[in-house]
Image (cartoon, coloured by chain):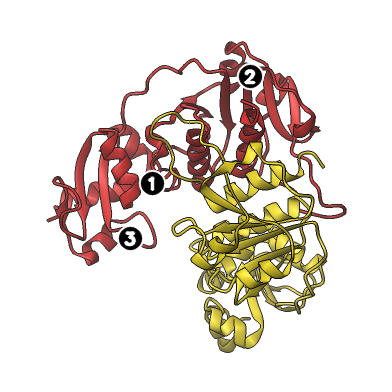
Chain colours: A yellow, B red
Amino acid sequence: MVSKNQRKQILQLKQKKYRLSTGLFVAEGEKVIEELLSASWDCVYLFSIAPHFHPQSEVIDPSVMKQLTHFKTPSPVLGVFKSPDLKALSKSNITLAVDGVSDPGNLGTLIRICDWYGLSDLICSSNTVDCYNSKVVQASMGSIVRVQCHYVDDLHSTLINLNKPIYGADLNGQSLYKTDFEEQASFVFGSESHGLSAAVSKIINHKITIPNFRSGRGAESLNVAVAGAIFLSEIFRSK
Amino acid sequence: MVSKNQRKQILQLKQKKYRLSTGLFVAEGEKVIEELLSASWDCVYLFSIAPHFHPQSEVIDPSVMKQLTHFKTPSPVLGVFKSPDLKALSKSNITLAVDGVSDPGNLGTLIRICDWYGLSDLICSSNTVDCYNSKVVQASMGSIVRVQCHYVDDLHSTLINLNKPIYGADLNGQSLYKTDFEEQASFVFGSESHGLSAAVSKIINHKITIPNFRSGRGAESLNVAVAGAIFLSEIFRSK
């Protein structure tokens, strides 16, 4: 059974301020929850509409799940997890950063792509959507257990302190396909609607563009997750 | 003012059967609607919550827009458009096809990526989500005016009839980065949950994988739009 307090808490966890004050977040979907459990992330409670999902899971009625879900369509399982303590940024040749990305689906997809290309960290400006937003967790498909998001107040200072050349995705830069990237490098992506912030723009060493192959009027941009995927593919293709 | 019939029709157009029987679809969002209008797609009616969006647009109250929208959050503009007659498949060295992609966001994003890389056609199996689904139109960011979706009953026959080598995205194939693609080629992507259908799998000449750079357990797959972006980047990078 779901207590009144549990229900209240699950719904409150839609809001970042409650996630911050409690250190908890909500995950939904079998695949995502299986990833969190196998990574031994601390599960506070777990509800499932089917029996035997997990020894810890409590069976609830689909109508109750409908009241708990953070989504339009509920998943068969929903869990409340503790967000783990952040480990220090791992030493890596390639560092990825995002500057003001607000779409949760884009951030989650980007986390999944980082995972695919073996990156363990993603640096996020403080105005980037919270990685424990349910939609981010969902879109990451559980990759959030292997890719840590480090939220920083001054993204530009953080990037400078890494002491690596900084490449910025930009609509007016040199071609991605004609750039020889340094072995050690940082890459930063802005928000779809506003691009890179002024402070970050200033410290970019190389502005890089994914060439547009449409002659005449075409798509004006690519979404940040797609741009990130194309960059990472290009960076790692020769490794 | 929105008439009772208009409201009813707009809501009915959420369903594919009504889109098919009327040849109409709903588009929302300024950017998308501007693209449709500049491409001279036939607009049946256009509603806006702000004045002067377009000579044809009728101003309505935000509370009314809330009743019309196909989304959780309404856009400032909503239009009903006629889906144009499909032109024949254009001659192109590179042909992209999708096999059973059901997520509207993924299909729309893929349409936008095709546009970026200059492709004008996308072949879709008949069980692929309808390209005039409002979420597809939205995610395409208007690229749907430049990329035609051709729905076919027998995707495998269509691909065979193109007389080009067929490359299929697969989790167990040769590395994308170690493949020299033919100048003229077809590429086919399956659904995220079920991969390629049996009929299409049989006719693939080369199964191609985006290598996973994570050692040990990592993301199991990439979403189809991201995979499509990485493939197209790799195909076009040397062009």
Tell me the mark number nearer the camera, choosing from 1 and 2: 2
The residue located at (45%, 47%) in the rendering is B139
Chain of the residue under label 3: B
SS state under label 2: strand
Quarter-wise, where is residue B70 in the image? Answer: bottom left
Residue matched to label 1:
B134
Could you tell me the amino acid type at mark 1? Answer: Ser
CA distance separating discs 1 and 2: 31 Å
A99 sits left or right of A86 in the view:
left
The residue located at (58%, 42%) in the rendering is A174
In this rendering, the answer to whether B14 lies above or below B62 is: above
B8 sits left or right of A40 in the view:
left
Location of residue A21 in the rendering, given as x and y in whole percent from the top left corner: 61, 88
Q: Nearer the viewer, residue A204 or B73?
A: A204
In this rendering, the answer to whether A9 lies above or below B8 is: below
Q: Quadrant of the C terminus of chain B?
A: top right
Quarter-wise, where is residue B231 in the image? Answer: top right
Residue matched to label 3:
B74
Q: Earlier in the sequence, mark 1 or mark 3?
A: 3
Residue matched to label 2:
B185
Neighbour tally class for label 1: few under 14, some 14-19, many 20 plus, Cα within 10 Å: many
In this rendering, the answer to whether A5 lies above or below B20 is: below
Q: Quadrant of the N terminus of chain B?
A: bottom left
Neighbour tally class for label 2: few under 14, some 14-19, many 20 plus, Cα within 10 Å: some
B118 sits left or right of B43 in the view:
right
Location of residue A33 in the rendering, given as x and y in whole percent from the top left corner: 71, 65
Could you tell me the amino acid type at mark 3? Answer: Pro
Location of residue B60 in the rendering, given as x and y in whole percent from the top left corner: 17, 59
The residue located at (65%, 27%) in the rendering is B238
Q: Nearer the viewer, residue A91 or A101?
A: A91
Count of numbered badges drawn on the protein: 3
Chain of the residue under label 2: B
